[in-house]
Amino acid sequence: MNAYFKDYYEKLLRQLSVDLNCNMSDFCARENVITASALNEGRRSYSPGRPFLEMATLGGNTVITAEPCLHSFLREFIKDKEGHRLFESDNLAKLNKELENYGYQMAPTHHMFLPSKDVNPDECCPVKWIYDDEINPFYGDLRFPNAIVFPEPCPARPDRIAVLAVEGDAIMGMAGCSEDAPHWQQIGIDVLPEYRSRGIGSYLVTLLKNKIIERGDIPFYGTAAANIHSQNIALKSGFRPAWVETEAVKMEPAAVV
């Protein structure tokens, strides 16, 4: 682990301990860990209220925070299993079946990245920077569902910075960041289809990552397990895989036919 990445990794342990109501050392344990969920100040939150279940792994064991009604099931669920294997489809299916009893289901897993090296890209295209309230006109814009919180502002995760790739009056793409926890800025990227395969995505993400670091904050990047294109953008921009996480969300009411 290089010194650059190690610094961010230690900050990650502190943040995950807040998110999952555990000790930093729990992520270094040999066994999986279960804790009672809590609304700790400074936690990242992607669903309203106290988490019914959230789980994360850094590649070794897994830490799960959950409502106490799930703990008996979870103790059997994690028994004799390597932590990272709890994120495999067969185990997630078992977990999902139990959650259905409470009106919940598992959300998709997210593969999360932290900075691992400096990248100073050659200029790819003209860019425009916007901040805070300057981002407001773009809410609801179907071109940018990933770069900013969509479709409307989210007070719990305010968008802070966006950088736009421009060609004359045309916007070719946008990278933006939301402050998901104090000083933790999650980056998202959208490049319009007609401008893809020109290196715009990795250029914008790299510029934004560098800007966040310059401002003294922590950039991070998340993507779906099968989104290889997005993962490659993260790698080209100086990120590396750091952890995997998922959570339980309330089931949508069945449609009336």
Image (spheres, rainbow, N blue to C red):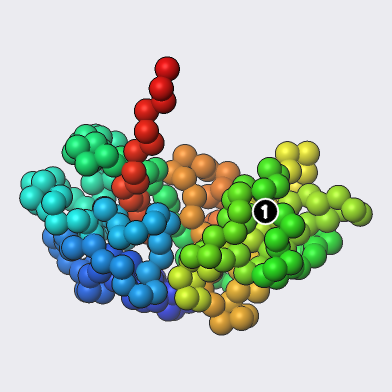
Asked if residue 130 lies left or right of residue 1, the reply is right
Residue occupying the point 42% across, 78% down: 7
Q: How many discs mark residues in the rendered view?
A: 1
Asked if residue 201 lies left or right of residue 23, the reply is right
Residue occupying the point 62% across, 80% down: 214
Identify the image quadrant of residue 256. top left
Compare residues 40 and 144 and report the one nearer the observer.
Answer: 40
Q: Amino acid at mark 1?
A: Tyr
Compare residues 186 and 2 and report the one nearer the observer.
Answer: 186
Residue occupying the point 70% across, 68% down: 133
Q: Please say if 52 is above or below 10.
A: above
Compare residues 21 and 59 and report the one nearer the observer.
Answer: 21
x and y percentages locating residue 83 in the rendered image:
21, 53
Q: Residue pushed farthest right?
A: 168
Compare residues 48 and 23 and report the one nearer the observer.
Answer: 48
Neighbours of disc 1 within 10 Å: few (<14), some (14-19), many (20+)? some
Q: Residue pushed farthest top?
A: 257
Quickly name the residue at label 1.
Answer: 139
Identify the image quadrant of residue 94. top left
x and y percentages locating residue 189 in the rendered image:
63, 53
Quadrant where the N terminus lies? Answer: bottom left
User: Can residue 13 be seen from the camera position used here?
Assistant: no
SS assignment at label 1: loop
